Image: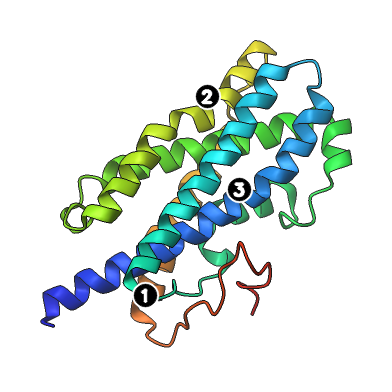
């Protein structure tokens, strides 16, 4: 394998490993969001159904990335929450981890629920823009399987942010505050310019021993 081939293989491996982490983190985190939405918006079955579809899509995307690895006969790199956009956003916004989010408190506090909707909306908008960029990348386009996965993700993405944007607009709420937009921008740049290159260069990064949908502790240190 020459240098160019080695770079391509490592880049795709790192990128897919970070994506599979975020897709798994996404659909499992949405279980908590659904709990809050069903309690807070019990009279809005349309919104609940849209969030349920969002959760199902994230799980579908995770399964596609898993299949991409299975066809290669290997496991993804074992990245952690430092590679998770939503992990950083929740920590910055609510000063706690996703696991520590108090669903009952969010349901009881309109401002907290609105803020959660904005965080999800901005995260999904960021993801949509990033996928559009990736689909123009010649390294991504050189791998037919990965290219097809990102095409599916691109097609699904609008359904992931529009429900939250619509809910905020229909209820006369602000769709984004400048502090939240800045946090989203800074998190994205940090992941792209610092974390991704760090994982790329760290040849000591182990691979997952088990799939996270089969073992909740797969990403644990």
Q: Of tags 2 and 3, which is closer to the observer?
A: 3
Q: Is residue 147 left or right of residue 23?
A: left
In percent of width and height, residue 131 lies at 34, 44
Q: Residue at x 72, y 39 (%)?
A: 33
- Of 121 and 173, nearer the camera is 121
Quadrant placement of the C terminus: bottom right
Tag 3 secondary structure: helix
Q: Is residue 211 visible?
A: yes
Label 2 vs label 3: CA separation? Answer: 17 Å
Label of residue 161 in the image: none
Q: Earlier in the sequence, mark 1 or mark 2?
A: 1
Q: Residue at x 52, y 61 (%)?
A: 21
The residue labelled by disc 3 is: 27
Q: Are marks 1 and 2 in contact (CB under 8 Å)?
A: no
- Of 92 and 106, nearer the camera is 106
- Compared to 76, does 157 lie above or below? above
Q: Residues within 10 Å of mark 3 (few under 14, many from 20)?
A: many
Tag 2 secondary structure: helix
Q: Residues within 10 Å of mark 1 (few under 14, many from 20)?
A: few
The picture quadrant where one finds residue 115 is top right
């Amino acid at each position: 394998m020459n240098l160019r081939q080695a770079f391509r293989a490592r880049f795709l491996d790192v990128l897919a490993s970070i994506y599979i982490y975020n897709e798994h983190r996404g659909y499992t985190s949405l279980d908590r969001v659904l709990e809050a939405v069903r309690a807070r918006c019990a009279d809005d079955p349309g919104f609940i159904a849209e969030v349920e579809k969002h959760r199902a899509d994230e799980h579908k995307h995770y399964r596609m990335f898993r299949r991409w690895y299975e066809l290669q006969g290997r496991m993804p790199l074992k990245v952690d929450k430092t590679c998770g956009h939503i992990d950083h956003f929740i920590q910055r916004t609510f000063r706690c981890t996703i696991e520590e989010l108090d669903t009952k408190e969010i349901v009881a506090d309109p401002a907290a629920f609105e803020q959660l909707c904005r965080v999800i909306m901005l995260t999904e908008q960021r993801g949509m823009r990033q996928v559009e960029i990736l689909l123009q990348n010649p390294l991504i386009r050189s791998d037919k399987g990965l290219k097809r996965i990102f095409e599916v993700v691109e097609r699904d993405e609008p359904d992931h942010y529009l429900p939250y944007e619509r809910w905020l607009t229909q209820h006369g709420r602000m769709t984004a505050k400048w502090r939240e937009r800045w946090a989203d921008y800074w998190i994205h740049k940090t992941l792209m310019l610092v974390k991704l290159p760090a994982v790329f260069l760290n040849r000591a990064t182990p691979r997952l021993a088990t799939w996270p949908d089969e073992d909740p502790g797969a990403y644990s240190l």
